[in-house]
Image: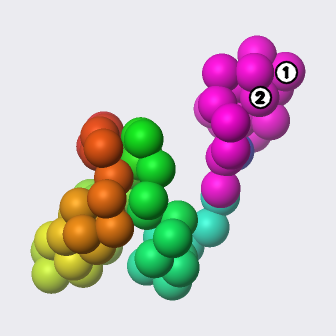
């Protein structure tokens, strides 16, 4: 959070909501967004968990999924 300045004033005006949590435990409604950013996430979980996360986001209705 601090490293990427996610609490900065500029960032707060760029995004409606920022959630910093273990995405594997996120409620399904968290994926129902115009944009879901999985930044520096998928490479840190097992392959089957990464596939599950992408499928959950898609099934929940995420319009765009950004993976970096």
Q: Quadrant of the N terminus?
A: top right
Marks 1 and 2, how far apart at CA: 5 Å
Residue 58 within the magenta-colored segment of the rendering: no
Q: Nearer the viewer, residue 27 or 48?
A: 27
Circle 2: element type: helix
Circle 1: element type: helix
Q: Nearer the viewer, residue 31 or 10?
A: 31
Mark 2 surroundings within 10 Å by alpha-carbon count, few (fewer than 14), some (14 through 19), many (20 or more): few
Residue position for label 1: 9
Relative image position of residue 48 (x, y in whole percent): 15, 81
What residue do we see at 31% from left, 59% from top? 61
The residues colored magenta run 2-19
Q: Main secondary structure of the magenta part?
A: loop
The quadrant where residue 22 appears: bottom right
What residue do we see at 62% from left, 67% from top? 21
Depicted 5 relative to depicted 32: above or below: above
Mark 1 surroundings within 10 Å by alpha-carbon count, few (fewer than 14), some (14 through 19), many (20 or more): few
Relative image position of residue 58 (x, y in whole percent): 23, 61
């Amino acid at each position: 959070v601090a490293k990427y300045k996610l609490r900065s004033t500029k960032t707060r005006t760029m995004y409606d909501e920022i959630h910093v949590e273990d995405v594997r435990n996120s409620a399904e409604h968290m994926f129902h967004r115009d944009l879901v950013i999985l930044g520096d996430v998928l490479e840190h979980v097992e392959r089957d968990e990464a596939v599950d996360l992408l499928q959950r986001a898609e099934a929940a209705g995420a319009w765009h999924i950004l993976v970096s």
